[in-house]
Each structure stands twice: as C-alpha cells, then as structure tokens.
Amino acid sequence: MESRIAPYRHEVKYYECDRMGITHHSNYIRFMEEARVDWMDQLGYGFDRMEAEGVVSPVVEVECRYKAPTTFKDVIEIEVHVAEMTALKISFDYTMRCKAKTVCTARSVHCFLENGRPVTLQIRFPELYSMICGL
C-alpha cells in the first residue's frame, strides 16, 4: 500500500528563506507536518477525521539532520515512512530531496490523546491501525 503514497512536494517560498537566501532551518519542521498530513490524507484517514472524532496526535519528539541547503523556488520532495508504531506512539521518518540530492533526514514521534488522556490507536481506531500495519 505504501507504494501508492506519493511523496509530498513543497516549493520553497521567499519568506521561508533567511537573510543569506537559504531556507531557514525551522521551516523543515513545518514541511514535515505538511508531508505527514498529506500522507494521512493519501492513506484515506486524515487528521481532520481523527480530530473530528475527538483524538489529537501531538508531537512528543522531533529531530532533523540537515545535509544540504535549499533556496527560494527549490522544490523539496518529501517521503514519509512509518519508522515504528507502539500501542501509544507512532514514529515517522522523513527523507527530503531536492534535485535528487538528500537535503534533510528527520523523524517525528507522536502520541494519541482523547480529552487529554492517552489512547491506544489499535483500540480507538482499529481501521487506521490495520492500514498502517499493512504498509
């Protein structure tokens, strides 16, 4: 199923660059979120659906390794993969490329909360859990 999930594409905006003309490092975290939301939408179970059902998925950990700079108008292609899934957390790995060159690798870890309390994805959203396990 994962082969059907296309990489997310982000064109770097002028305002995302610093005074040196390089994409500011903080924007890569935003790009990860855009790619993750797109990944869930392509899976057919978007965050909007999950949140409408009362569950949120906050970031509990994030890391980035910057490999090469990008600049205004560059198109960054972002591949998202599930790195690990436990009862209460899911980890995503991101590979960001521009012109076939890896510019950033990253990981984000998320939990699932309903009314501020942890929930188990397998119990609360068995359909989504099965889809992710099937990747």
Image: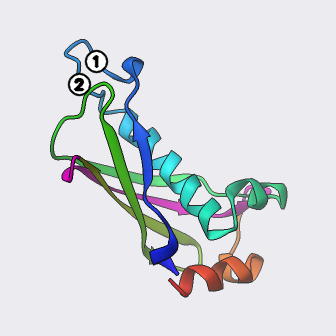
Position of residue 134 measured from the top left corner of the image (x, y, whole percent) = 55, 87
Taking the image as shown, residue 133 lies to the left or right of residue 65, namely right
Identified at 24% across, 34% down, the residue is 70
Using the image as rendered, state which of residue 123 and residue 116 is in the foreground: 123
- Which residue bears the numbered disc 1? 18
Secondary structure under tag 2 reads: loop
Q: Are marks 1 and 2 in contact (CB under 8 Å)?
A: yes
What's the CA distance linking mark 1 and mark 2? 6 Å
Q: Residue furthest right?
A: 53
Residue 22, label in figure: 2
Colour pattern of the rendering: rainbow
The residue nearer to you, when weighing 66 against 118, is 66
Q: Which residues are magenta?
A: 99-117
Q: Is 60 left, or right, of 13 in this rendering?
A: right
Q: Position of residue 106 (x, y in %)?
A: 32, 55
* Location of residue 17 with respect to 62 vertically, above or below: above
Residue drawn at (74%, 76%) of the image: 125
Q: Quadrant of residue 95?
A: bottom left
The residue lying toward the viewer, choosing from 122 and 78, is: 78
Mark 1, secondary structure of its residue = loop
- Residue shown at 32% from the left, 21% from the top: 17
| Main SS, magenta residues | strand
Q: Quadrant of residue 73?
A: top left
Three-letter code for the amino acid on which mark 2 is drawn: Ile
Left or right of 79 in this view: 44: right
Q: Is residue 113 magenta?
A: yes
List x then y, in percent, for residue 80. 42, 63
Q: Is residue 58 left or right of residue 67?
A: right
Give the class, few, some or many, for how many residues have Cα within 10 Å of label 1's Cα (few <14, many ≥20).
Answer: few
- Residue 30: x and y, percent? 46, 39
- How many other residues sit within 10 Å of disc 2, few (<14), some (14-19) or many (≥20)? some
